[in-house]
Image (tube, rainbow, N blue to C red):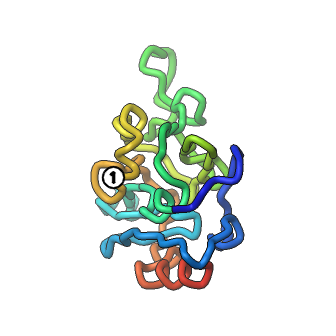
Amino acid sequence: MLKPQESRIIQVKMVRPASRINMASDDDIEFSVAEDRRYTKEHLWLQVIDKEEDEDGNVQTSVKVGVSEFVAAVWGEFIRVTLPNLTELEGFDDPSDKSSEKKSSFEGELSAEDILVTLRTSDEVVLLDSPFPCGILELNGEVEDSPDMVNSEAYGDGWLMIVRPHDYDEDHFLSPEEYIEFLAEGL
């Protein structure tokens, strides 16, 4: 397993894994890649769970988002997972505010530059940005209560949130085969 050099904060952008970590030739990393998802170069997985057409004929896509097993394999066990605080996001509908019309059809809005999730290990803090502007439909609070779910059930109950991207095109993201090739180039 990789040994942490020191405590640090890492903001993951579109970089290759090898540019963030030093790997010795005897280090083995084992992880799986789910076949029914797309991936980002920041190691998030995206799974379309619903597509529906609105009254204007626009297709609305609901996407479940999680962290690939690669992240846990490289950075180790997560001891804390922090999801966005909905009350701090634009478009948040405060149920106690009865004064005006509903601001948004979502609980909160994320831009492509907003932090989607913060993952903490015993030595590092990993910040992952949202891969697209979106509205948050549901947060999986269980991963904040039990962060080990992100490690042990990355493609199952360890998902982070369900979002509705403002413009989703799966071709902008990596297929499982492309994601494996991306990782192989960096390792």
Q: Is residue 117 above or below residue 1?
A: above
Image point (56%, 41%), residue name:
122
Quadrant of the snapshot with the C terminus:
bottom right
Image point (53%, 71%), residue name:
27
Image point (51%, 57%), residue name:
166
Percent position (x, y) of residue 146? 36, 36
Percent position (x, y) of residue 106? 45, 40
Mark 1 Cα shell of 10 Å, populated few (<14), some (14-19), many (≥20)? some
The one nearer the camera, 34 or 6, is: 6
Mark count:
1
Q: In this view, does 32 lie to the left or right of 94?
A: left
Q: What residue type is labelled 1?
A: Ser
Q: In this view, does 61 lie to the left or right of 102?
A: left
Q: In this view, does 158 lie above or below 35?
A: above
The one nearer the camera, 157 or 170, is: 157
Q: Is mark 1 on a helix, strand or loop?
A: helix
Q: Name the residue under label 1.
A: 152
Q: In this view, does 20 lie to the left or right of 183?
A: right
Image point (33%, 52%), residue name:
152
Occupied quadrant, residue 58:
bottom left
Report the residue that reaches farthest toward the front: 26
Percent position (x, y) of residue 1? 51, 62
Percent position (x, y) of residue 21? 66, 65
